[in-house]
Image (cartoon, grey):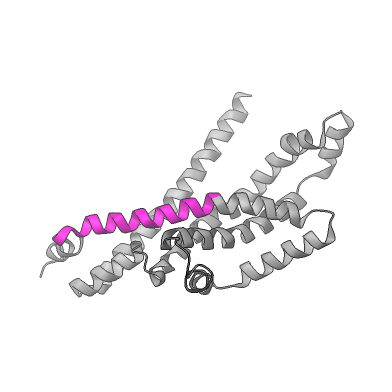
Amino acid sequence: MSFTEILYKILIQGGSYMTILKGLWATVQISVFSLIAGTLLGAVICAIRMSKVKILRFIATVYIVILRGSPVLMLLMLMYYGVFARSSLDAVTIAVITFSLNVAAHIAELLRASIGATEHGQVEAARTLGFSAWQSFYLVTLPQVIKIAKPVYQSTIVNLIQWTSVVGYVSITDLTRVINNIASRTMQPMITISIGMLIYLAMAYIVHGIFALTDVSHKRKERSE
């Protein structure tokens, strides 16, 4: 069998490409919704972690330590087979909740570290000029935080996409599970899995490309000003 025939068998025969696209869509959905929810929750946890109330800081710290130190697969299985075992939530929703909780812990620490690395003197100067605490944060601190956090945030997104590859353990037909099924059916694991890896690699480079475009756009805006 020629290489072309093998590719046809893997990607085309029996509507394989449609199955791959459906699996890819499941992966993208879980990644996007988890990222949005995890970022918002992470910002809230960061605010709690930096609050002046000791008990709140302790709770946020415990949350971050536990979620960052727990294997994602074990957490997913705990949520699916334990916490939400008797609920009416579908597997995809449970996966989104799980990854959101995990991502939030990483984002919270990222934001806290980024805020700690900003120039506090600029904030004090803004307050001296009559800016409110919110205005000082929004106009002075936040732009610095975004700039400092962007590279690590980008890596967090790529890691999240990779983490979603375990959702097949809770009956979700994502990209990884589809690739595994096709590899078993066609008896071509080497080529099939390589194709799957290339798709994940392509998603990672799309993320890198988006961030690169935002950097270029920001630089052009600065030059125009």
Q: Position of residue 64 (x, y in %)?
A: 67, 64
Judge by depth and name the residue closer to the eye, 12 or 147. 12
Q: As rendered, which of 9 and 78 lies closer to the eye?
A: 78
Q: Residue at x 29, y 63 (%)?
A: 195
Quadrant of the snapshot with the C terminus: top right
Up the image or down, 142 lies above or below 117; here it is: above
Q: Position of residue 107 (x, y in %)?
A: 63, 56
In the rendered view, would you say 205 is above or below 60?
Answer: above
Residue for point 22% across, 56% down: 17
Classify residue 68 by image quadrant: bottom right
Left or right, 217 with respect to 164, comes to: right
Instruction: Please check the rendered image and state whether residue 27 is part of the magenta-colored stretch, yes or no.
Output: yes
Q: Count the marks.
A: 0
Examine the rendering and report whether any part of residue 191 can be seen.
no
Q: Residue 175, image x and y in percent?
A: 34, 62
Residue at the extreme left = 1
Residue at the extreme right: 128
Q: What type of secondary structure mainly makes up the magenta span? A: helix
Residue 78, given in percent of the width and then of the height, sits at 52, 73
Which residue occupies the foreground of this view, 46 or 127? 46
Q: In this picture, is 111 found above or below 54?
A: above
In the image, residue 186 above or below residue 23: below
> Does residue 5 appear in this view?
yes
* The quadrant where residue 189 appears: bottom left
- Residue at the top extreme, as displayed: 225
Q: Is residue 197 left or right of residue 3?
A: right
Q: Is residue 206 left or right of residue 154?
A: left
Closer to us: 73 or 86: 86
| Range shown magenta | 13-36
Determine if the magenta segment contains residue 207.
no
